[in-house]
Image (spheres, helix red, strand yellow):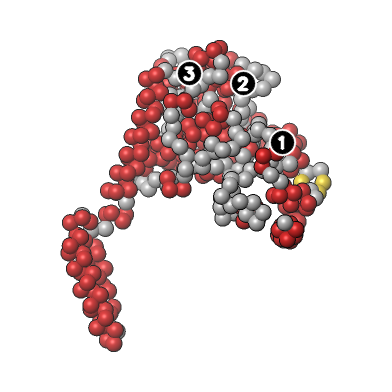
Amino acid sequence: MSTNKALLSSALRSIQPSRLYVEGGQVEESFYIDMVMKPTTAWPSITEPGRVAYLGDSSHVTLLTHQVQDPGNAVQYLIPDNSRGTRSSRSNIDTVENQILAQRGAFLLPPRSISDELVESYFTWVHPVIPVIHRARFMRQYRDPKNPPSVLLLQAVFLAGSHIYRNRDKENATAEVSVLTFYKRAKALYDANYEDDRIVIVQSLVLLGWYQGGSAEAVDSVNDWNRLAIVVAQGCGLHRCVDGSQLSRVDKSLRRRIWWTLFARDRFTAMSLGRPPCINLEDSDVAMITEQDLVEHNSQRDSRYSLGPQQVQFYLQYVKLSQLAGIILSQHYSVATLLSGEILRRKLSSLELSLGTISRFWGIGKVAYELFQKVIDEKAPECI
């Protein structure tokens, strides 16, 4: 064990000095060594699921921990409080940035009556299709002025809900429910890195994809925002199974809901736009979503927030259909499967000409050429 500790100490000394400093002073090198050496069972439940970061098997931290722990076990560490930036500390540092956001109206919210209607529109019509938000938790925060939901997520919810609100009540729609206004506010907050909760960021990115400007913008918006959401989701490990983690049951279910929603949108977007999908399921071990994952309440008081039986079944079948869409894309529309026997023959013809210029290898090359030609003739019907 002493050898391993010396190895960790040497590795940490090679890290850039700036990475060992945090606001308020220097973090002792021994802290990071102890962090890697500590058993995971001593850690309490994860109270900030949005602050979870994922480091895969090839990461430097994983390679270090494998020196002292079983490589087959997932390891979780808590970042020290003094090394994690808080919104209050960022507010003091980024005063100018906050002033710019305020001037752009990023913190402005509609009147309460309109806000209530937008939230209701979102959860009635949008949420059953993309249940990336735990409704009961969101509503508790929405009604609590001391602990409101993320302003980024709130603007994104208003964005998605305003589509329904404006279509339903066009005569009374005002600038206060402008889809473009909410989009600009949410995008400004995202671009400024105002939010540090990764789960909230993923949720907001999914909803930002609901913005539809011109026809060309609509295509790019859905595709780009969803792909960006996937990248952030993979960064916090939403593509990996967390059943053995210390996350709460609600957070585990929410992660599965978000991941499979991203997967479904990725597959259907790829199919409708004729573009390659972004998610490779071979990199994921998340269990298939179930009815239990769609439970929206923890108490009888919150039971009104649950999806109806038909809505639950719709979403489950929607995800299964997206899996079939992915299979169709990979087996019939990937570049590899579209290579016909004729294209392969052209490649071999080109190869024959190349081999012909190398006379002393032509004997071997001709045998190989004839062998490949025979294989192509036999397999050509399957390739077309």
Q: Which mark is residue 153?
A: none
Task: Determine which quarter of the picture holds residue 268.
Answer: top left
Circle 1: residue type? Thr
Residue 56 located left or right of residue 125: right
Residue 274 is situated, as x and y percent measured from the top left of the image, at 33, 45
Q: Which residue is mark 3?
A: 306
Q: Residue furthest bottom?
A: 360
Position above or below: 357 against 44:
below
Task: Return the residue nearer the eye: 62 or 42.
Answer: 42
Q: What residue sits 36% from the left and 46% below the top?
A: 275
Spatial CA span between label 1 and label 3: 33 Å
Task: Return the residue nearer the eye: 145 or 318.
Answer: 318
Q: What residue sits 66% from the left and 18% below the top?
A: 145
Q: What residue sits 52% from the left and 27% below the top?
A: 133
**Residue 284 is at least partly visible in this image:** yes
Closer to us: mark 3 or mark 2?
Answer: 3
Q: Which residue is mark 2?
A: 141
